[in-house]
Amino acid sequence: MNPRIARIAALSISLVLSACTGTPKGTQPVAGFALERYLGQWYEIARFDHSFERGLDCVTADYTLRDDGGVRVINRGVNLETGEEDEAEGRAYFVRDESVAHLKVSFFGPFYGGYNVLVLDDEYRWALVSGPTRDYLWILARDPQLDPAVYRKLVEDAERMAFPVGELIEVEQGERCSTWR
């Protein structure tokens, strides 16, 4: 292969792959982020629909430190209609500065996607998280229920950042989930 074409191909592939770990244009991940405070269990309060979570409720995300300095991610959920449980294990690493809540996460081998904490409570009780594009959005909380005023605030924050908030799906975290916790 022509060396010039090889360099262009390598650059193109690099740009495509780096876009997968980026942040949505016009958004900024939280600065002053403290990973040790973020670790632990989070409940998914709302999300955009995607095939990898379709039909799941009672969804939680557990974050723990890995031996290599990264973050072990365990996502769990259940389809309340069928009773089928689903679990996925991934790994996440900071993209650059560990004080900025911009990570890359992988559940599928060498392929990473952006994980961006865009809004975070000072006490680390709730968060607004996006993927690399406006197609991915989650509202997370430390408790299975989130104060409605806080939920509205997070939806308004997401709307100001041009996310299509009308597509948010509220995740069941109520009494029906107690069987799977």
Image (tube, helix red, strand yellow):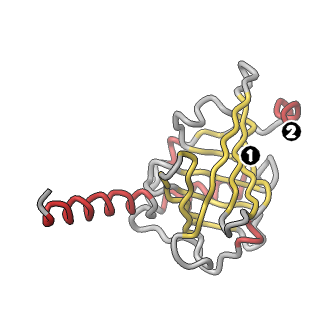
Q: Which residue, given by chain and number where applicable, does mark 2 sit on?
A: 181
Residue 147, visible in the rendered structure:
no
Report, in whole angstroms, how far the alpha carbon at label 1 lies from the one at label 2.
9 Å
Q: Quadrant of residue 92?
A: bottom right
Tell me: residue 162, above or below residue 167.
Answer: below
Element marked by disc 2:
loop
- Give yes or no for contact between labels 1 and 2 (Cβ–Cβ under 8 Å): yes
Q: Which label is found at residue 60?
A: 1
For the N terminus, the quadrant is bottom left
x, y percentage for residue 29? 54, 70
Q: Which label is found at residue 130?
A: none
Left or right: where does residue 156 sit relative to residue 139?
left
Q: Which amino acid does label 2 sit on?
A: Arg
x, y percentage for residue 77? 72, 36
x, y percentage for residue 171? 68, 39
Residue 79, visible in the rendered structure:
yes
Left or right: where does residue 166 sit relative to residue 44?
left
Residue at the spot 71% in from the left edge and 68% down from the top edge: 121
Choose between 138 and 161: the one closer to the eye. Answer: 138
Q: What residue type is labelled 1?
A: Thr
- Which of marks 2 and 1 precedes in the sequence? 1
For the C terminus, the quadrant is top right
Element marked by disc 1:
strand
Residue at the spot 58% in from the left edge and 32% down from the top edge: 54
Outermost residue to the front: 1
Choose between 93 and 19: the one closer to the eye. Answer: 93
Q: Residues within 10 Å of mark 2 (few under 14, many from 20)?
A: few
Choose between 168 and 66: the one closer to the eye. Answer: 66
Q: Quadrant of residue 9?
A: bottom left
Outermost residue to the top: 82
